[in-house]
Image: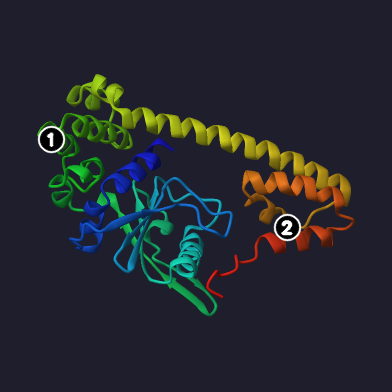
Amino acid sequence: MSYDNTCKYLAEKYPADFARWLLASDTSDIQVLKTELNLEPIRADSVTFLQIAKQILHLEFQTTPKSKTPLDFWMLDYYTRLKREYWCDIEQVLIFLQPSSSEIVFNTQYVDKKTRHEYRVIRLWEEDPTPLLANPALLPLATLARTDSPADLLTQVAVNVDMIEEIDERQNISACVQVLAGLRFDKSLITQLFREEIMQESVIYQDILQKGLQQGQEQGKKQEALQLIMRQLTRRFAAIEPEIEQQIRTLSITQLEDLAEALLDFSSQSDLVNYLGNISLPQPNQED
């Protein structure tokens, strides 16, 4: 998760730079929106929402195309929730960090019978590094861009990092560069070009590590809660329908805790279905 958290930090720290890169927008009037939407549960630290004028830029960073929920459906799900909450134009960009031959990284739409939803896909290994090298905020992404000589590209990134005048910014960008460069380069080359103590001194790097640790702890807690609830439900109702189990697995820790208490009053599996249906209902619009 350190790679995703690094990208999230960059997008939220330098939203105008990402807007210029992806939208050709020069506005500085940008608001970073929360990553949790009202219709729970849907959250991920690799997701960033930037509100630009009457438009939202939704960035999704993926190290690999693997995902429990298909990414094309994930993008549709985010789109409908964002649309319901903010009701404005939405530009979605799914950015893959590592090279992959999976058909998922080449897919730009969700298609299901009468439903079709399109979004942009960026495969960093195919991107021209020139605009990324020209912007300090995008230097970490430049390490993963297209090149015939990866070592030369990383050297150029290191030179550009050294040219950043403000010390704290230079340390933080350097730390982000080293994290993302780890997806492509040997540690020996990275440490040869960048001083390791700069990464260690970076407040951002320490924050990224801490977030990664917290996420691991939260995932562990959620897994324990899931196992407990599934044991309780299986003992109470024997077999649980696969689609119901899948819906339970999408619940947040708080919702799982609420379910653990509520299921004590369930007399049949239909009570469980009704309960899950109720917590999935859209939140009422305050303007209604």
Residue 102 x %, y %: 42, 54
Residue 82 x %, y %: 46, 64
Callout 1: few (<14), some (14-19), or many (20+) C-alpha neighbours within 10 Å? some
Mark 2 or mark 1, earlier in chain? 1
Residue identifier under label 1: 164
Which mark, residue 64? none
Query: Residue at 25% of width from left, 47% of height from top?
Result: 14
**Of 137 and 72, the residue lying toward us:** 137
Q: Nearer the viewer, mark 2 or mark 1?
A: 1
Query: Residue at 50% of width from left, 65% of height from top?
Result: 81
287 is higher (above) or lower (below) than 238:
below
Task: Tell me the kind of residue under disc 2.
Answer: Ile
Quadrant into which the C terminus falls: bottom right
Residue identifier under label 2: 244
Task: Tell me the kind of residue under disc 1.
Answer: Ile
* Left or right side of 201 for 46: right
274 is higher (above) or lower (below) than 232:
below
Residue at the outermost front position: 287
Residue 210 x %, y %: 44, 29
Element on which disc 2 rests: helix
Q: CA distance from mark 2 to mark 1?
A: 53 Å
Query: Residue at 23% of width from left, 54% of height from top?
Result: 16
Q: Marks 1 and 2: in contact by CB < 8 Å?
A: no
119 is higher (above) or lower (below) than 70:
below
Query: Residue at 49% of width from left, 72% of height from top?
Result: 111
Count of labels in the image:
2
Residue at the outermost right position: 267
